[in-house]
Image (spheres, rainbow, N blue to C red):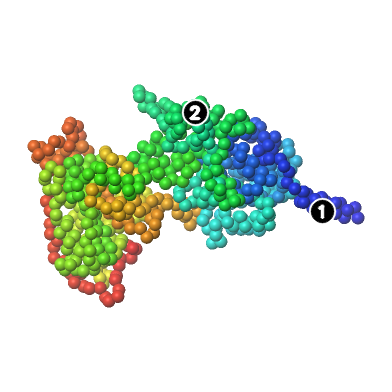
Amino acid sequence: MSNLSSGYAEMIEAALRGARPDPELQVDEWAEEHMIVPKDASKPGKYRISHTPMARRILKVLSPRHPARRVVVKGASQMLKTQVALCWLMASAHLAPANMLVLEPTDSLAKRLSARVQKCIRDSEVLQKVFARPRSRDSRNTVFAKDFEGGTMYLATAGSAANLAEIPARYLYVDEASRLLENVDNEGDPLRIAEARLTTFDSNSKELITSSPLLPGDITDAEFDRGTQEVYLVPCPHCGHHHELLVEHFKYERDPDTGFMSRAWFVCPECGAEIDERHKSMMLRDEPMGGTAHWYAKSLGDGETVSFHVSAFYAPVGSITWLKLARELAHARLQVERGDPGAMQVFYNTRLALSYTSTEDQSSAQELMQRAQAEAYAPRLVPDWALVVTIDCDTQVNRLEAQAHAWGYGGEHAVIDHQVFMSSPSLHPDDPASPWAKLDAYRREPFAHQSGVLIYASACGIDTGGANTQDVYNWASARVHTGVLAHHGATRPGKPIISTTPRKADIDWNGKRVEGGVLLWEIGTDTAKDHLHHRYKLTSGAGAMHFNTALPLAWFEQLLAESPLLKRKPGGGYRRVWDKRDQGARNEGLDMAVGNLALYHYLGLHKWTPVDWQRLRDKLIPKNVIADLFVQPPPPAADVVDGLPAIATQPPPSAPPPPAHYAQQPPAGRRVISKGLR
């Protein structure tokens, strides 16, 4: 009977505990009273919000009595995200215990967080009383499940739907949300599956999502946009104006003697005064610390989500410095100039806590058109600094398009012409109405150089991946000897701008391989688009792109129709791909710019030195016609060989009579296309 009485008493106590309202104590107050930062951390000892004042409001919003249901922290790497989560989880286990689900992208991250949780329990007397002791034969405190009085903390990975099912929870913590799988076991988004575990506690559940974002379209940005989108405003030490620490206000300089980064500072957007890092500790102080820094909400949100954004510029004194960030940013900008955006993406994601959109070098179609009008490059005229012309073509169901680029030293180039030949590419090239006949005539027309001499196109490319692939094969295979390259795109990252060798790919209408058929060159379209994208704002020098005054606004919109977007990989994580922002937009201008860049590399012009360009200039343009391109050319290098790569100084030879397979018309209603080329 005594056992029944004891059981009844425990049942009554549990019922009363469940009905008891959550305590008034705030999570931030609890953390400063009970939380211990382990010895292996940068700031061991009792947890102090004064070290990171930005955390105060986040912890208050996570407190049991605050009405927010969802809290999102979009933060830089090593910037308070995990510590805030631990404070909240430990305080909740003590103050308002209930089941907790902690979701990590991988098993290794789940184990790492479990170890940090165990250190928190080990170092806090109050938590030692709440949590079960870890024992090898005790299932109540393991790596992935930690029992405490009133609930259990489950640490799971997002790789299996079974990890997320059948666990009713009041609290949900999702770490590194941008790195979760898109679809778990064909059951959907792991975040939405995990949120379904909160249904039992619908009236008082709370969810924390922390991550640094990757690229536009990822889950961190989406969840942040649902909320209040709060940013931390700090006062200018000179005028008191409150502002956000943004990269556009961040400046740095190098020592003129050593070239090393010597100073980094911010400029106040209000008074223009310089703000040094020595001001940071004073600027970060919030009202409880005697300062005026505060969070500012940019949106009302959805009514239940409070979201925060914090970059590494707010890192506490003793952590990463502005000077270190300046070095990383300078390196990233240098890499972008060289055509590699990888370092800039890392800086944006891990330091600025922003999805990478290349905003530093992104131009609008209107801006590029205005620059074209200001630079005043005449159509079909090769600028003085350019000596080589290439033409690339695009095939549509009712037309052919051709685009000519003029190239100079270092890849500086100008779009000197864009033509559209309306008519069906299915028409035979001998048909006067055929766009192929018009394209042949166009290829043989010279372009006037600014000096007055005539320059012919050195190479002509045409994409086989669009409409009328077989017609493209037939036309190109008959003109290989005239400098025509048939090419197709490869969207996999890391591919070279153009392959070193082509492969044979031509077949006739009956599906038979043609001897000596078309040579198909592969273009690394992602690599080429990255290369062009990061040079649109350059107005001169290596890689700069110029535009003639006849190009309409619609052409510039085509050039900017695509942008790097985030696509989730089937096995988890993300991959960066180029895609249209508007799926209905035209992108022929961009495709032909990519094709011309591939021709530039095919001709080997990217390897040319100033000496090579000067020798070509001497060959094409008499010195008494116009001044030398290089006033004082360097002496010839020892490895410069006599002669230049084949550059056109006369029109391309005429195409031979069409091969036999031209006479074979395709069977009615069917076209035979090489497998895998679409």
Residue 458 rendering spot, x and y as whole percentages: 18, 50
Q: Secondary structure at mark 2?
A: loop
Q: Secondary structure at mark 1?
A: helix
Residue, disc 2: 239
The quarter holding residue 230 reads top right
Residue displayed at 68% across by 54% down? 203
Residue, disc 1: 11
Is 354 placed left or right of 46 in the picture? left
Dot 2 or dot 1: first in sequence order is: 1
Q: As rendered, which of 327 and 234 lies closer to the eye?
A: 234
Check the image and report above or below for 139 versus 268. below
Whether residue 621 is visible: yes
Q: Quadrant of the C terminus?
A: bottom left
The residues tagged by marks 2 and 1 sit, at their Cα atoms, a distance apart of 62 Å
Residue displayed at 45% across by 50% down? 216
Residue 448 rendering spot, x and y as whole percentages: 14, 48
Res. 408 mark: none
Given the image, on which type of amino acid does mark 1 rest? Met
Q: As rendered, which of 630 and 571 lies closer to the eye?
A: 630
The quarter holding residue 392 reads bottom left
Residue 107 rendering spot, x and y as whole percentages: 57, 49
Residue displayed at 38% across by 25% down? 255
Give the farthest residue toward the bottom.
668
- Decide: marks 2, 1 in contact (CB < 8 A)? no
Residue displayed at 24% across by 46% down? 414
